[in-house]
Amino acid sequence: MEYPLAVRARFERPLQLAGHGDASPLSAQAGRADRGAAVALLVWPDASGTRAQSVRFRAFGCPYLVAAADLACERLRGAGPAGFEAFDALALGAALGVPDERNGRLLLIADAAATIARRWQGLNTAHHAA
């Protein structure tokens, strides 16, 4: 299968890939490797706790998933919980030339981003209640 140039470049050299020992204050996983695709997002909020200072990923799946996760991390950097909740993973598909039949893989990224948003909002609520 021939992949678009943008997909090949991000698959071969992902810039936002998390290391094996990386642990973040906020993380979420969607999908299952034993079912062919899984993605985890790891987020380090800024000092104020309102914006993502760094966003990294781990992924198991096709080159489209890896490339889209890499691009998602770039786009989510600087976002707060609302940005993670509203994140449009299908827009990544259009930017990368992902075929429609692979959009299900992209939805894993949206699921992980939405989970991050809920967890982040929960942390902020608990912090303000204390």
Image: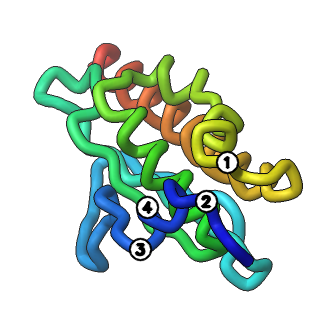
- Toward which corner of the image does residue 30 lie, by quadrant? bottom right
Looking at the image, residue 106 sits to the left or right of residue 99; the answer is left
Looking at the image, residue 104 sits to the left or right of residue 63; the answer is right
**For the point 55% across and 52% down, which residue is it?**
68
Q: Position of residue 29 (x, y in %)?
A: 57, 59
**For the point 47% across and 69% down, which residue is it?**
11
* Proximity of marks 1 and 3: CB atoms separated by less than 8 Å: no
* Proximity of marks 4 and 3: CB atoms separated by less than 8 Å: yes
Quarter that holds the N terminus: bottom right
* Residue on which the image places disc 1: 97
Q: Position of residue 17 (x, y in %)?
A: 34, 64
* Residue on which the image places disc 3: 12
Q: Secondary structure at mark 4?
A: helix
Looking at the image, residue 17 sits to the left or right of residue 53; the answer is right
Give, as a three-letter code, the residue at label 3.
Answer: Glu
Give, as a three-letter code, the residue at label 4.
Answer: Arg
Looking at the image, residue 22 sits to the left or right of residue 11; the answer is left
Instruction: Give the label on residue 10, or none.
Output: 4
